[in-house]
């Protein structure tokens, strides 16, 4: 049966929903092809969906089959500009080992040269003690597409990328994710005005100069800040008072029993931006010994009243403490969503290798009911996946 042509927006919606429900990147081609079997009017839009988001892995550890697929995709992109022009989000991963590194660099350069319509670019580079010169094709392509990029992610340091020159061309950038190893030396503040900024810092307090340098012109635009570091620098190195639009803060740091100072600094940090609406805290390791006991810091009671959403997905808080905090009507005044670790608090006398138990179902329900009385929805991230196994 031949179906009548559908409006473009309907076809696009069907393809997107099919890919969302029935698989990620690995199944996207199959699902889009299935749509095209229904009607040829799907073909153009399925092709656009297929090339919209690409990830290419140029790694020495790739299997021969995967290498062949990547090479075939690159050949398609370089020989078919009309297809390469469909790519809007591009991710490229590079390996540091192997005798064919020169060839890999050529392939990466060819990929960036072909995909000139990219708006979001992510580069995963190895960290090497001996920096290699940036391939001319890579540097030239980054300069060419820099002005249109709205999102840029850079992990690792392998090439001596001219960061000052690159950032000077990133005028439209709204989201930046980077680690300090990739930055090298930054001499001046970029002019871009970010809405989202994510940085992974090595354990050196002086490095916190870098975020302030990168965000000098984003103080009125930054909405979300993500920090991944071992220890929080002490005030005034970390101060959010100038970021007037900031509403979301995500911090990954050591919350272990010996790191009470980090909790203290987090509380000081929250006072510099009392209008935060979303806060996410997490320990970098799933389980640590001795287990952190954050109850003694009165963490939940000290959260700013402006918070609508708070997450502490690791480490766990005791059920007794959570219930006491929910019963305290002087705290969590504006909270609507609370995401917590579903594990029970580990006994500090247990062995390091002891895997924490899941809270009793009765405890989970008791917390959920107590939160509901305050108009708060409780999430237990990862619990549904665990129950499905």
Image: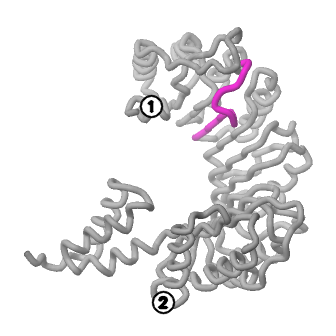
- Give left or right: position of 88 versus 110: left
Within-10-Å neighbours for mark 2: few <14, some 14–19, many 20+: few
If you read the primary sequence from the N terminus, does the residue marked by circle 2 or circle 1 appear first?
A: 2
| Residue stretch in magenta | 278-290
The spot of residue 262 in percent (x, y) is 79, 30
Q: Mark 2 sits on what residue? A: 80
Predominant SS of the magenta segment: loop
Answer with the quarter of the image where residue 240 lies: top right
Q: In what element is the residue under mark 1?
A: helix
Answer with the quarter of the image where residue 126 lies: bottom right
- Give left or right: position of 161 versus 192: right
From the viewer's side, name the closer residue of 148 and 381: 381
Residue 147 seen in the current view: no
Distance of mark 2 from mark 1, alpha carbons? 44 Å
**Magenta-colored stretch includes residue 279:** yes
**Magenta-colored stretch includes residue 227:** no
Answer with the quarter of the image where residue 59 lies: bottom right
Could you tell me which residue is drawn at 75 percent across and 64 percent down? 97
* Applied colour scheme: one colour
The spot of residue 95 in percent (x, y) is 70, 64
């Amino acid at each position: 049966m031949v179906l009548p042509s559908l409006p473009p927006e309907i076809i696009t919606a069907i393809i997107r929903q099919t890919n969302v429900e029935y698989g990620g990147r690995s199944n996207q081609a199959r699902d889009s092809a299935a749509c095209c079997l229904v009607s040829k009017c799907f073909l153009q839009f399925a092709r656009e969906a297929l090339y919209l988001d690409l990830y290419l892995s140029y790694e020495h550890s790739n299997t021969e089959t995967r290498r062949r697929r990547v090479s075939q995709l690159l050949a398609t992109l370089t020989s078919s500009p009309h297809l390469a022009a469909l790519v809007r989000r591009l991710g490229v991963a590079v390996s540091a080992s192997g005798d064919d590194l020169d060839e890999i660099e050529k392939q990466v350069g060819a990929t960036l040269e072909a995909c000139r319509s990219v708006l979001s670019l992510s580069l995963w580079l190895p960290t090497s003690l001996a920096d290699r010169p940036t391939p001319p094709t890579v540097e030239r392509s980054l300069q060419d597409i820099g002005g249109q990029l709205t999102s840029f992610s850079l992990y690792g340091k392998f090439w001596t990328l001219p960061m000052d020159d690159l950032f000077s061309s990133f005028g439209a950038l709204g989201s930046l994710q980077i680690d300090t190893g990739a930055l090298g030396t930054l001499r001046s503040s970029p002019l871009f005005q970010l809405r989202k900024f994510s940085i992974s810092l090595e354990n050196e307090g002086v490095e916190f100069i870098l975020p302030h340098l990168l965000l000098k012109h984003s103080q009125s635009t930054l909405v979300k800040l993500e920090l991944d570091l071992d220890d929080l620098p002490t005030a005034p190195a970390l101060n959010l008072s100038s970021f007037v639009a900031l509403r979301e803060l995500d911090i990954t740091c050591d919350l272990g029993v010996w790191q009470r100072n980090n909790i203290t600094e987090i509380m000081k940090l929250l006072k510099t931006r009392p209008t935060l609406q979303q806060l996410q805290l997490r320990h970098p390791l799933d389980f640590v010994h001795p287990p952190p006991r954050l109850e003694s810091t009165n963490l939940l009671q000290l959260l700013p009243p402006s918070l609508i959403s708070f997450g502490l997905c690791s480490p766990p808080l005791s059920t007794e403490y959570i219930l006491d905090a929910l019963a305290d009507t002087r705290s969590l005044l504006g909270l609507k969503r609370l995401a917590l670790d579903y594990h029970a608090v580990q006994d500090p006398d247990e062995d390091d290798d002891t895997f924490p138990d899941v809270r009793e179902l009765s405890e989970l329900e008791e917390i959920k009911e107590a939160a509901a009385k305050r108009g708060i929805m409780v999430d237990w991230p990862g619990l549904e996946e665990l129950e499905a196994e």
